Amino acid sequence: MMLRLGLALVGLVLVVGLGMAARTAQPPGSEQVPTPAPPSNKPPEPCVRFGQAEPHTEQSRLFESTSGWIGADGSYSVPLSPTRTLWLFSDTWVGQVRDGKRTDATIVNNTAAWQDGVGPAAKVEFFVRRDADGKPTALITPADGKGWYWLFGGALAQGRLWLFLAQIERTNDKSVFGFKQIGQWLGIVDNPEDRPVDWRITQKKLTNCFYEPGGSRTFGTAVMPIGTDVYIYGTSEKMLGPVPRRSLIVARAPLARLDEFSTWRYWAGDKGWSEKPEEAHYLTSDMASEGSVSPLPGGRGYVLIYQADFLVPEIMARTAPEPWGPWSRAVKLYRCPEAAWDRRIFCYAAKGHPQLTTETELVISYATNSFDFWHVASDARLYFPHFIRVPIAAPAEGPPPP
């Protein structure tokens, strides 16, 4: 899920939010919000064994910058070449870190970075757009001038970069839920080899999403290119009081024609692939608004990485033989230790990064934040991408665990 914090300070405009986990009302549309149904059958066992996760300190340290870009959440990644990874961030601190505290700082809604290489020789270069006066500003802004963007999944194909952009707007609610999603856009970058601040971007609004008081349907939660196609995962959400219940859904489209929404087809369960987004079948019923789906090493299937339930600091995994399922029972991979530091801290936005994965381990990131803005400002250990590594192996012989 995309969890956010922010406040208005003197000379500092910040965005307050607690992610896509909650939305306030907006004028109702014509679509019915379906109620996710629980799976009718017991889910299968995972097709791999997951070992004991541990912090990936080497990868985390690449993002512990103390000047300029000094922390962000989101942390979607797109391979640009065998050696270069594009990182996409949402709300981002820009300023300085001194004595473990953020100072002389502001927040912008999105930024990017390049990572060249992996391991001890890896280097990261951050990109923060600046206006004519040299002040930090968002890397990408909505074409219609409304609200701002948080950056979601993306893919590279035939010399173009495709990015999913969640359009967010403030509400009158003064709580941490004082925002709503009002749209989802596809950004098409014609020159992805150039520095992100020099990108030429065309934006197209998705026509298969809706956002209503009782729920929503959106796409771009995870993006997985396979051959000449791309699988675009999303969520169907229904509000149950203040807490949303989300189910994972998936569409498929030709990668080279991703911006032609009429080419999208939606997995509809027993019906196969449908032209109608409202027929999208629920794949799992405990999804977050952010996550990842990627191939497992060795052609062993696919793995879904996501955060469990609302504000639970646990990273979960499911596997499947096909991109549309059937998805296995959920396996808890890791409990984020930062949540135990202070009751104000929460963890979110878990996702895997297949370009960093090896034959024997997964690499996963997550974000940390606090309900107290000043806590984040005064403790620079928070609000950086944190990485873990998770060993994987072939499933053991014998009956599954109870």
Image (cartoon, rainbow, N blue to C red):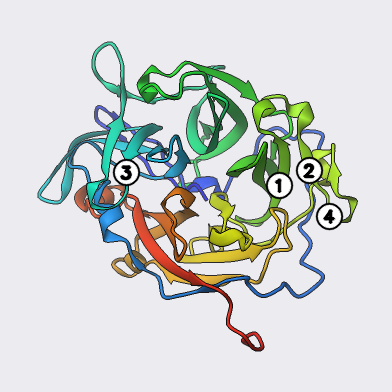
How many C-alpha atoms fall within 10 Å of the one at disc 3: few (<14), some, or many (≥20)? some
**Type of amino acid at the residue the image marks with label 4:** Gly
Compare residues 53 and 397 and report the one nearer the observer: 397
The quarter of the image holding the C terminus is bottom right
Where does label 1 land, which residue? 250
How many C-alpha atoms fall within 10 Å of the one at disc 4: few (<14), some, or many (≥20)? some
The nearer-to-camera label among 3 and 1 is 3
Label 1 to label 4: alpha-carbon separation: 11 Å
Q: Earlier in the sequence, mark 2 or mark 1?
A: 1
Where does label 3 land, which residue? 117
Mark sitting on residue 266: 2
Mark sitting on residue 269: 4
Which residue is rendered at x = 79% and y = 52% of the image?
Answer: 281
Compare residues 50 and 379 and report the one nearer the observer: 50
Q: Quadrant of residue 184?
A: top right
Residue 295 at x, y percent in the picture: 58, 54
